[in-house]
Amino acid sequence: MNATHEKLREEFDAYVAEDKKIEPKDWMPDGYRKTLIRQISQHAHSEVVGMLPESNWITRAPSLQRKAILLAKVQDEAGHGLYLYSAAETLGVDRADLIADLLSGKARYSSIFNYPTLTWADMGAIGWLVDGAAIMNQVPLCRCSYGPYARAMTRVCREESFHQRQGYSIMMELMKGTEDQKAMAQDSLNRWWWPSLMMFGPSDKHSTHSSQNMKWNIKRFSNDELRQRMVDMTVPQAELIGLKIPDSDLKWNNETGHYDFGEIDWEEFNNVLSGNGPCNKERLEARNKAHDDGAWVREAASAYAEKKSKK
Ligand code: FAQ
């Protein structure tokens, strides 16, 4: 590191330590830029791939109102993807390259979207648990040191809280219904509970990026801290409507003021991350097909933009 570089680095660290925002044209260490590109693009891919499990149920929603709500929610996820790809582009990458990495299977997206949606109750569980976990993780990201990401998160979080409530409202309604409907809700919670806790990432002991990203004020809380908050928030919500969390080790701990809970199946998590989850292949095939089918739209938009710029 030469003297100028060292000085820039010191100024950057001091600036971040004062909780100020870094903007696209500011100097930043290569590692900061790289980790943000990785995280923001992974986040954008998650929003876009995340549309697939729910869009599977739009045509089968049980009422016109539920259909309209689900349609709006899935559209919101597309919008979140767009804000996030735009935020990533401010770091000097090209969206087309990021998308190519998603389509080839090189880039990651959230593990949660590699699980199938088998019943209508899964729309409830996704909104309640998956959006619930997403908010838990994203609210602190509104204070992330990188300005464009923090601002995108503020907007995304407002919409996610509507998503979370609509999911819980589906679960609540099913739990007021017939025995079959109650069983459907419970089965859905049983399948989505553990994968939702996995969304927060590996345990702190195994998280490679946490310590540096916390110093850079990208992350404000560790993976395990946020996971614990999720458990503490969700258990009373489940109890309120008569659902049982599928964890025999779950119990309130008076000393810590938190719930103790069982061990996550990390083998399953790692398996999903390495491309072998129940739906990894199907999700990538669906994204690749959508990309190919949409080629004419991109070509038409480029031709139109070129024609306009010539005028
Ligand atoms: N799935 O060192 P860490 C949503 C990777 S949005 C897949 O702990 P970090 C909205 C990680 O990238 C959901 N990969 O990493 C919605 C790293 O990869 P590397 C997405 C995971 O970054 C709702 C490696 O493991 N949200 O749901 C996962 O410090 C409903 C080591 O991990 C975001 O992306 C995982 N679960 O912490 C849409 C939020 N966890 O370097 C539709 C922004 C970890 O080996 C319907 N991201 N990895 O290639 C973050 O906050 C962080 O990136 C974490 C991971 C917390 C996800």
Image (cartoon, rainbow, N blue to C red):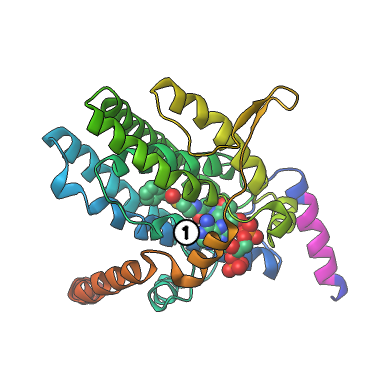
- Figure check: 298 above or below 189: below
Pick whichever, 51 or 257, lies toward us: 257
Does the beta carbon at disc 1 come under 8 Å from ligand 1? Answer: yes
What residue is drawn where x is 28% and y is 48%? 74
- Figure check: 73 above or below 278: above
What residue is drawn where x is 41% and y is 29%? 243
Q: Amino acid at mark 1?
A: Ser
- Figure check: 39 above or below 168: below
Magenta region, residue range = 4-14
Q: In the rendered view of the protein, which quadrant contains the C terminus? A: bottom left
What residue is drawn where x is 76% and y is 57%? 12
Question: Horizontally, is 150 left or right of 76 in the view?
Answer: right
Asked if the magenta segment contains residue 7, the reply would be: yes
Counting from the top left corner in percent of width and height, residue 62 is at 15, 37
Counting from the top left corner in percent of width and height, residue 93 is at 50, 71
Counting from the top left corner in percent of width and height, residue 246 is at 48, 39
Q: Residues within 10 Å of mark 1 (few under 14, many from 20)?
A: many
Asked if the magenta segment contains residue 20, the reply would be: no
Pick whichever, 166 or 143, lies toward us: 166
What residue is drawn where x is 32% and y is 36%? 185
Q: Quadrant of residue 50?
A: bottom left
Dividing the image into four equal quarters, which quarter contains ligand 1? bottom right
How many numbered callouts? 1
Dominant secondary-structure state across the stretch colored magenta: helix
Q: Which residue is mark 1?
A: 111
Counting from the top left corner in percent of width and height, residue 168 is at 36, 31
Mark 1 falls on what kind of element?
helix
Residue 201 at least partly seen: yes
Q: In the rendered view of the protein, which quadrant contains the N terminus? A: bottom right
Residue 87 at least partly seen: no
